[in-house]
Amino acid sequence: MANLESTATVPTQSPDASNHGISFRDAMWVWARVAALSFGGPAGQIAVMHRIIVEEKRWIGENRFLHALNYCTLLPGPEAQQLAIYIGWLLHKTKGGLVAGILFVLPGAIAIMALSWIYAIFGNVGAVQALFFGLKAAVLAIVLEAVSRIGRRALKNNVMVGLAAAAFVALFFFHAPFPLVILAAGVIGYFGGRSGLAPFLTGNGHAKVGSNQVADADSALGEDIPAHARPPASWSLKVAAAGLLLWVLPVVALLALLGPGNVFTDIAVFFSKMAMVTFGGAYAVLSYVAQQAVDHYGWLRPGEMLDGLGMAETTPGPLIMVTQFVGFMGAYRAPGSLHPLVAGTLGGLLTTWVTFVPCFLWIFLGAPFMETLRSNKALSAALATITAAVVGVILNLAVWFALHVLFGELQEIRWFGMTLEVPVLRSVNVPSLILTIGALLAVFRFKVGMIPVLAASAILGLLYGLATGAI
């Protein structure tokens, strides 16, 4: 590998961003490379970004990277994409943030759109059904592994364990609104940290993302804050106005032209609301999206949500890109006067627009003031409790998926204000159960990577389809 020290020119004390020695063209190629390698959900994407931006290129240092990550974790939306926007903005102003953020989602958006077309056209073909039959088992194992991974990081004491359990009970048994659960966890953590209570002072919830430590002073950007990262208030107001216009104008236009109740209006309003409450990462919000898309709007069947998640797991880009598949299928099944595929394409693009445009707004508006968050114990505690609650949220997602995939029939039981879906044991899907157990063993016992598990599960699904004559 080339000498790492030769990949960047360390600046002097000048805070001028133009002196960091990183050309915009080089940055574009690097962000394209990061996007192409960004598989495996936010944890894998952040690790790839750290390896390339910090360890290999040495454009920014370890502390600055982690501080930016902590800030992005506090925001709604996909933290990995927001981290790319933040670093791109820090290096090359607004155009840098735009290029980094767009390139980060572009490969996944193209791949999910292509797979959505294939799914809509050939979804009833035996080979496609067998393929996704196998993928569902792997996705269940991957979601449960996410519960374990985040739990080990976040549940550092009994208070955090209790918050995770409370979040699961509130969602699974009482169907509490997801945003309310996250808000309640953040409020509890904020006041607990502000009061100085020991269980809440557990740090920011992020372990070190790399072993090769790069000091900020030894990076291309250096320790100083670039001049453009301290804009006046008028600049922030202009950014806020432009971002809100780009985000809200399509929603308002659809409401005015099509009225409430139209599938495109529903997509625009629902995913705009989701963009404001998606704290805790993709797995956490997918529980909320899955239940709303399946139970409330009827855009998807439960198994189809897992199919979409399988697509997102096997393509680059943010895992939350699965929402594009949700919007595609919702519009595809209610096209009105449009051709179903045209309606689906528009629905998917609309979903992606209202999901990701706010990410740029949050960064461009808030990042210049992020230094005020440094060493703030109350905000760190709020982040820790939100992360703990997310463990319960993701567990709820895993249980919800498992019930709908492994069992063909569920029975609803109401008891003391609780509503519980209990599986009918005779309806168990034995082949799916066997595949799921195999995927769980591969992930937890043998530590097999995500991509091999997904590939093996898909192949086994195809073999099962051949053996049963479904293909």
Image: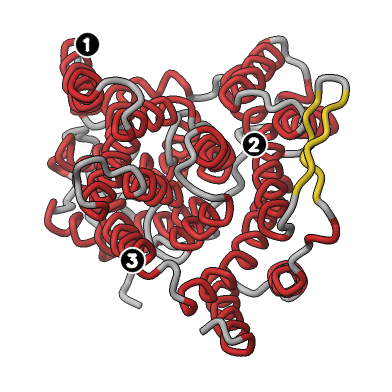
> Of 136 and 391, which appears nearest the observer?
136
Q: What kind of element bears circle 3?
A: helix
The quarter of the image holding the N terminus is bottom left
Which of pointers 1 and 3 lies earlier in the amino acid sequence?
3
Distance of label 3 from label 2 (alpha carbons): 36 Å
Q: Position of residue 322 (x, y in %)?
A: 43, 51
Circle 1 residues within 10 Å: few <14, some 14–19, many ≥20: few
Q: Secondary structure at mark 1?
A: helix
Q: Which mark is residue 390?
A: 2
Secondary element type, mark 2: helix
Crowding near the residue tagged with mark 3, few <14, some 14–19, many ≥20 C-alpha atoms within 10 Å: few
The structure residue drawn at horizontal position 68% and vertical position 57%, both measured from the top left corner, is: 145
**Which residue was labeled with disc 1?**
233
- Marks 1 and 3, Cα distance to the nearest angstrom? 50 Å
Tell whether label 2 touches label 3 (CB within 8 Å): no
- Is 69 drawn above or below residue 445 in the view shown? above
The quarter holding residue 137 reads bottom right
Q: Earlier in the sequence, mark 2 or mark 1?
A: 1
**In-front residue for pair 4/377:** 377
Residue 371: where, in percent of width, then height?
Answer: 40, 23
Mark 2–mark 1 Cα distance, whole angstroms, equals 34 Å
Horizontal relation, residue 197 to residue 136: left or right: right
Q: Which residue is mark 3?
A: 121
Is disc 2 surrounded by few (<14), some (14 to 19) or many (20+) residues within 10 Å? many
Instruction: Check disc 3 and give the amino acid type.
Output: Ile
Tell me where residue 340 appears, x and y as whole percent.
26, 52
Residue visible at 64% across and 74% down? 448
